[in-house]
Image (cartoon, grey):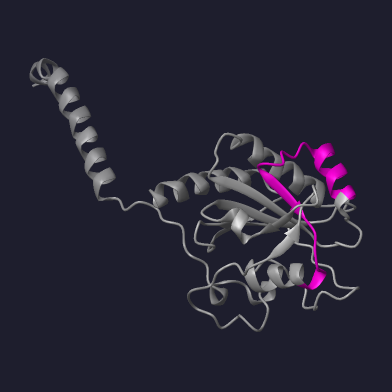
Amino acid sequence: MLQFFAKYKFFAVVLFVLSAIIVSIIYSILKPDRKLPVYEPDMVNTELVDSTVQYIRKYHQIADFNLTNQNGVSITQQDYKDKIYVADFFFTTCQTICPIMTGHMKEIQDRLIDDQEVLLLSHTVTPKIDSVPRLKAYAQKKGVIDSKWNLVNGDKKQIYDLARKSYLAAKSDGDGGPYDMVHTENFVLVDTKRRIRGFYDGTNPEEIDRLIEDIILLKKEGK
């Protein structure tokens, strides 16, 4: 009996390897491709969503906007037309989470520097303080590439409405008044149709890796 198994040991090993390969191929064929969800307001933590849009279950898109970037140039949704982009909210005087978030946005910029389909958009939540010259100095200090990444200011209420009603990413219940402060660690992934496809902790390095993976997945979906 032992001689029999010894004689056919090689064939058994080959058969086992072939079986494993066949099973792996079948699994890969039958396994559905992972697809990113399209986030609607009713799917998101109500603390992060303005009460006026919490009931929306479909067709949610980022609203039109008109802001000014670090070069004093008007930035609208048209500058992001047909682009995948990552949005966040920050302010230049922040000494807590913002430096970490900005560093991670810089990492995303550098990792996708040659990808013309992906852009970045950072909104200051203290637009009166973060003037164009201040944003420009901050951008230069942090290594922002103008063609890839816009740091924008503008009307405070517009920015806060974008945070609460469009990007669904901030806990402030205010109306953009002088004492309101949006302070969120969320990075928001937006697709070419202005839909939200993911939320990520901008202070967590592992989340940045996940974000990059999701961008690649989103690009494949578009093709």
Q: Is residue 23 left or right of 101 when viewed as pictured?
A: left
Q: Residue at x 52, y 47 (%)?
A: 215
From the top left corner, tell me how far across and down residue 151 is, in percent: 76, 51
Name the residue at the front extreme: 73
Question: Looking at the picture, does residue 38 appear above or below residue 157?
Answer: above
Decide whether residue 136 is among the magenta residues: yes
Query: Of residues 3 and 99, which is closer to you in this image?
Result: 99
Residue range corresponding to the magenta coloring:
133-157
Quadrant in the picture for residue 127: bottom right
Query: Of residues 90 and 158, which is closer to you in this image?
Result: 158
Quadrant in the picture for residue 18: top left
Q: Residue at x 63, y 68 (%)?
A: 64
Question: Looking at the picture, does residue 53 appear above or below residue 150?
Answer: below
Quadrant in the picture for residue 43: bottom right
From the top left corner, tell me how far across and down residue 159 is, in percent: 75, 67
Question: Looking at the picture, does residue 17 appear above or below residue 35?
Answer: above
Q: Quadrant of the image for the N terminus? A: top left
Decide whether residue 63 is among the magenta residues: no
Q: Is residue 218 left or right of 27 when viewed as pictured?
A: right
Question: Looking at the picture, does residue 185 appear above or below residue 53?
Answer: above
From the top left corner, tell me how far across and down residue 164 is, in percent: 69, 72
From the top left corner, tell me how far across and down residue 198 is, in percent: 55, 58
Q: Residue at x 19, y 23 (%)?
A: 13
Query: Of residues 16 and 216, which is closer to you in this image?
Result: 216
* Number of numbered callouts drawn: 0
